[in-house]
Amino acid sequence: MDQKMKSVYIVTIIVLCIFLVGCGSGKVPPGQVPQFSVRIMAYNIWLGAGVNPASTVQRGTNMDRLADLISLVKQANPDILGLEEVTDWTSGNPSIIEQFASEVSMDYYLAPTSRGIDNAIFSKYPILEVENLSEFVGYSGALRAVIQIPDGQALNVVVVHLDPIDQVLRSCQFDRIRRIMETYQDEPSILMGDTNSLPSDPETSYLTQGGWELVQSELIDNIFVLSRQAWSAKPMCIISNIPLPNCVLDTGISDHMPVGATISFYASPNSSGMPSSLTQTPIADCNEK
């Protein structure tokens, strides 16, 4: 099979899975209508989408790709967006992040990290509460936000960028986030971003053993959900090189692909169960080996 036919074959399979099979994990009783749905997307934009090519933290060729990023986000049209490697976005007047938020019509919160490779969350809905988790999980960074969805419920959203090199450190980071989020396990929660781990990697179990379930994966960029309520998910169709109807076209803005889904929550309980008690063992310091 030549390369062109192979690409068409792969895209065809992806589209069939998304549009014919439909929802991902659900455990939802037949015929039940969701209480609310939210369209989310996470994207590691590779060192600020090149807004400052002269920056000393840049590596290799890094042309300004901000306009392409804005176009992609408008096409994807998420309700909530998490970005990683938001580098140099506080520069300018107005700042890059203010310009971006205005272009996509979203509120935002920027969580700085010690390396300056920051994380950010953007939302069409009110952001009620924010917390920078970077000091707890290590220098790569994470944030937590509470977002008020249209029906009045509060939704916890965690955006992460975990360590790219050390598996032991990533295990600590997963474990620390799981323990932090145990406080909010009675509320629906979403975790998304660059975990630098495949869902099958051993360190991911530190998250999933706390009741987090995989929603969607794009290699090391992942979305998980923690919910006592039943839920279902329809993956966002994101492809490169071959435009298709109802799919977001990624034009190579980053060395990562975006990952997205529409997640629906229901009144019935989640049949997969949830942890019944909080973890009692001490929490490790992820800044130490």
Image (cartoon, rainbow, N blue to C red):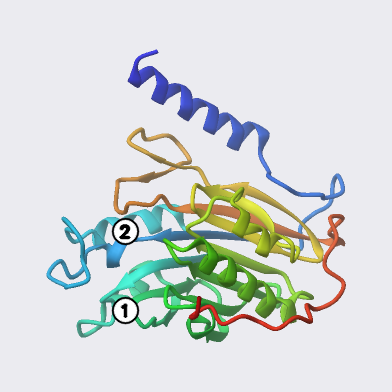
Q: Where is residue 102 in the image (x, y as percent from the top left)?
A: 34, 74
As drawn, the residue found furthest toward the top would be 1
Residue 69, numbered circle: 2
Q: Residue at x 39, y 58 (%)?
A: 74
| Residue 259 versus residue 289 in the image, above or below | above
Q: Where is residue 262 in the image (x, y as percent from the top left)?
A: 61, 54
Q: Which of 127 and 54 is in front in this view?
A: 54
Residue 68 visible within the image: yes
Q: Residue at x 17, y 73 (%)?
A: 56
Describe the element under mark 1 as helix, strand or loop.
loop
Query: Which tag is nearer the camera, tag 1 or tag 2?
Result: 1
Q: Residue at x 65, y 56 (%)?
A: 263
As drawn, the residue found furthest toward the left would be 54
Q: How crowded is mark 1: few (under 14 residues within 10 Å), some or many (20 or more)?
A: some
As drawn, the residue found furthest toward the front would be 289
Q: Which residue is drawn at 53% across and 82% down?
A: 133
Residue 149 visible within the image: no
The tag earlier along the polypeptide, 1 or 2, is 2
Q: How crowded is mark 2: few (under 14 residues within 10 Å), some or many (20 or more)?
A: many
| Residue 159 versus residue 282 in the image, above or below | above
Q: Position of residue 273 (x, y in %)?
A: 85, 60
Q: Position of residue 131 (x, y in %)?
A: 54, 85
| Residue labelled with disc 1 | 116
Q: Nearer the viewer, residue 28 or 136?
A: 136
Q: Distance between the residues labelled 1 and 2?
A: 20 Å
Judge from the rendering whether residue 267 lies leftward or rightward of residue 72; answer left or right. right
Describe the element under mark 2 as helix, strand or loop.
helix
Residue type marked 1 = Gly
| Residue 64 versus residue 135 in the image, above or below | above
Residue 62, numbered circle: none
The quadrant in which residue 154 appears is: bottom right
Judge from the rendering whether residue 137 lies leftward or rightward of residue 153; answer left or right. left
